[in-house]
Amino acid sequence: MNDDIAVVTGAGSGIGRGIALGFAAQGATVIAADLDLDSARTTAQDYPGLIHAMKVDVADRAQVDALRSEAHERVGIPNILVNAAGWDRTDTFLNASTEFAEKVVAINYLGPVHMCSAFLPGMVESGDGGRVVNIASDAGRVGSSGESIYAGAKGGVIALTKSLAREMARYQINVNCVCPGPTDTPLFQAQPEKLKEALIKAIPFRRLAQPQEVAGAVLFFASDAASFITGQVISVSGGLTMAG
């Protein structure tokens, strides 16, 4: 991937960090974008010169546009976009406030919308095609108790992926989606202990995914091996969900 330029949101920790490091290991130039700039800089330290840390709040379209301008100026027009930034807090639907619901939707659904709106025009204008990989969740495929709003937002990401894939195909831009199951990330570790234990027991492999295992599916979708694959959703869940 020596000629590739990838933008990865949420790259300061967890799955996003694993993806950014995976691209850099293959020689790609990576924009590690995160709300926490210090965390993004920590990711960049693993591959100096290849990973460039930048700050962004994906829920804020003005910040996303500023990120695009900085990325274009510093490294050029990216041909790979990975929307990995996400946020949630487990609770029942009846306890969810309007503010909480709006935050979940703004980060998990509108974030990818903003990023695609900002970066896809450059890919189209370049005429060289490109790859978009959205990180949704198995919660968006099969539902998840205590995560109804999050599941709804991630279901929206899956539908967005399929619809964008149809629109972008004429420009040779592939759009696919990876749905992680429970993964060893700071977001997972912040969940109640009983919930974490129950989820691990429910996974046939009896363990959490590691961020680099999710990254493997992302790197596949972003590679030439997936050149004729678009609009597809793959679960990386250790068999927790097996729905078609």
Image: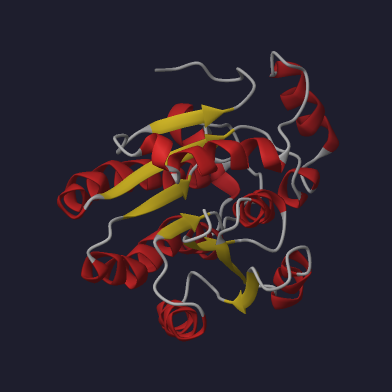
* Left or right side of 25 for 131: left
- Taking the spot 42% from the left edge, 84% from the top edge, the residue there is 69
Q: Answer with the quarter of the image where residue 35 lies.
A: bottom right
Instruction: Choose between 85 and 194: the one closer to the eye.
Output: 85
* Left or right side of 230 for 32: right
- Taking the spot 64% from the left edge, 57% from the top edge, the residue there is 24
Q: Answer with the quarter of the image where residue 29 lies.
A: bottom right
Residue 213: % across, % down: 66, 35
Farthest residue to the right: give it.
193
Farthest residue to the front: give it.
2
Instruction: Choose between 166 and 226: the one closer to the eye.
Output: 226
Residue 244 in view, yes or no: yes
Q: How many marks?
A: 0
Residue 79: % across, % down: 39, 61
Instruction: Choose between 129 and 120: the one closer to the eye.
Output: 129
Height in image: 89 above or below 217?
below
Indicate the quadrant containing the C terminus: top left, top right, bottom left or bottom right: top left
* Left or right side of 98 for 191: right
Residue 137 in view, yes or no: no
Residue 113: % across, % down: 36, 62
Farthest residue to the top: give it.
204
Q: How is the image coloured?
A: secondary structure
- Taking the spot 65% from the left edge, 48% from the top edge, the residue there is 15
- Taking the spot 45% from the left edge, 76% from the top edge, the residue there is 64
